[in-house]
Image (cartoon, grey):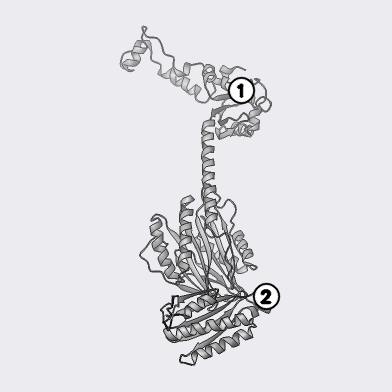
Amino acid sequence: MNFTRWSARLPGTQRRAAARAEHTVSPDRRGDGSVPAARGEQLTDDMPRVPAVDELPVRDVLDRVPALVALVHGPDHRVAYVNDAYTAAFGVRPVGEPAREALPELDELGLLPLLDQVLRSSKSRTVKSRKTPGGRSYTFTCTPVDASDDKDGGVLVFAVDVTDHAEAAERLRASERGQRETAVTLQRSLLPQELEEPDDLRIAATYQPGGTEAAVGGDWYDVITLGGGRTALVIGDVMGRGVRAAAVMGQLRTAVRAYARLDLPPHEVLQLLDGLAAEIDANQIATCVYAVHDPNEGRLVYASAGHLPILVRDDSGIVLRADEPTGPPLGTGGWMHASGSVPLGPGSTAVLYTDGLVERRDQDLDEGIAALSRALAGATGTPQVVCDRLVRSAGVTADHDDDVAVLVLQHPARTGHDSDLFRNAALELLGGVEAAPRARAFASGVLTSWRFPTELHDLGVLAASELVANSLQHGTPPMRLRLRRTDRRLIVEVTDGDDHLPRRRRAEPADEAGRGIAIVATIASSWGSRRTPGGGKAVWCEFALPRRTA
């Protein structure tokens, strides 16, 4: 193979030779001002002549280049030349043999189809950071070589060793994977390991971290039993990525659980959370929905801080969208949040979710919410089944580009034997001396009809009597006594029109009052009080039912 003939056909070689012939300075014109004086001095007989780049022997140059160089020609890519660096990397390669046999390393790297493509299109192609069997990584550039006086063209293969860059990139990716794993571990450890199980609701939740490197965000959810049969549900999303977002999420979740114990209305909980979010990190903004379910009311009372609307499917299959009221995200400050409500009666299903479930780059957010509504309308089964179906319908996969959190709750419609385990009874108290005896008689009759054992019957009547007496003494009309049983507990609750919350205190021997709440706290499994939305308060206590009764 005449390498000199092939090298003359490298792109640009012939053009540079013609340009050099046109611009060569003649001896009789040196120093006449047509070239700079410095160039004229270099061309005198007293100075050594410096050869032009185009005059250097191509083969000598390529043999000394540290990059790998190979020249192949024809449709079989027969080897015309390999430089010393190529031989040092892969060994001696026979000239004139097809590349499939003579250059097996290119075959293993899948570069032979690329050579065909370059030969057909006469356009250069580059593949980055291919790892060879020897462990080194190279970036290959394949350039077409013209052969105007020959029927076949060729391809110049030029490979640069990028092993150090590839190893650095792999170390960076490993570091990012480590950060992601740390963030995922932190995120999952801060989420509820087991959801609380309210008596009146069936709940399931799922969390799917984002699939991109170190893309774990601050999505979170929680279920909090408040006592008296009420349940708080919360879902939120901390803006940002990585460990910092997960840490802020953990602080907000802990704060919500603490504020929930105060049994405040949803908008007051968000008001407290808004101030705390600004103190935790003024640069971190979070959205959140806090909702409370009361089985006696059959509604879900909620407040939203910039979060997506709750979706509720009623027992007839119609999906409602709880849009208002919605305030700005947590941490912005200067906003008075408000509470709204949506029906959640027996047979209803509600969904709380984060934006990763419905937000896509190629569609409007409202379109994603509408698609979720349609999916919810046709999703039946247990809460976990509904949760899984909604995630699948949204196209969430392991490589999804955002975190996804979904919380599904159902208020089941109970019939048959189950309906006997969930019962309610209420009595309006008008006040006066006859209110306490009427309350005791009412409680005794109801608990007898519910077939409670004697001990639990007597404790329930005593608790009802003490709570009614406390309300008569310290409260104002209207007053109501409510008894509720579930498959796990008996709940006794008294409401009145005064918003002063009672507290347990130690009564001195000479005190004529102050023992009622202490007695209730002693005999009951738990007790508590809260202010009611319309003004006034509710005081309640619970008794755990024996397993044989349930």
At 61% from the left edge and 80% from the top edge, which residue is drawn? 455
Residue 265, located in which quarter of the rendered image? bottom left
Residue 193 pos. (x, y %): 57, 59
Where residue 62 appears, x then y in whole percent? Answer: 53, 20
Q: In the figure, is residue 457 to the left or right of 44?
A: right
Residue lying farthest front?
509
| Mark number, residue 548 | 2
Quick one: label 1 or label 2, which is nearer the N terminus?
1
Q: In which quarter of the image is residue 454?
A: bottom right
Residue at 31% across / 13% down in the picture?
Answer: 31
Instruction: Characterize the local packing of mark 1: few (<14), some (14-19) or many (20 or more) Cα atoms within 10 angstroms.
Output: few
497 versus 21 height, above or below: below
Image position, residue 355 (x, y; %) = 51, 59
Q: Label 1 is placed on what type of residue? A: Asp
Query: According to the image, label 1 marks what residue?
Result: 150
Q: In this view, does 148 lie above or below 118?
A: above
Q: Residue furthest top?
A: 46
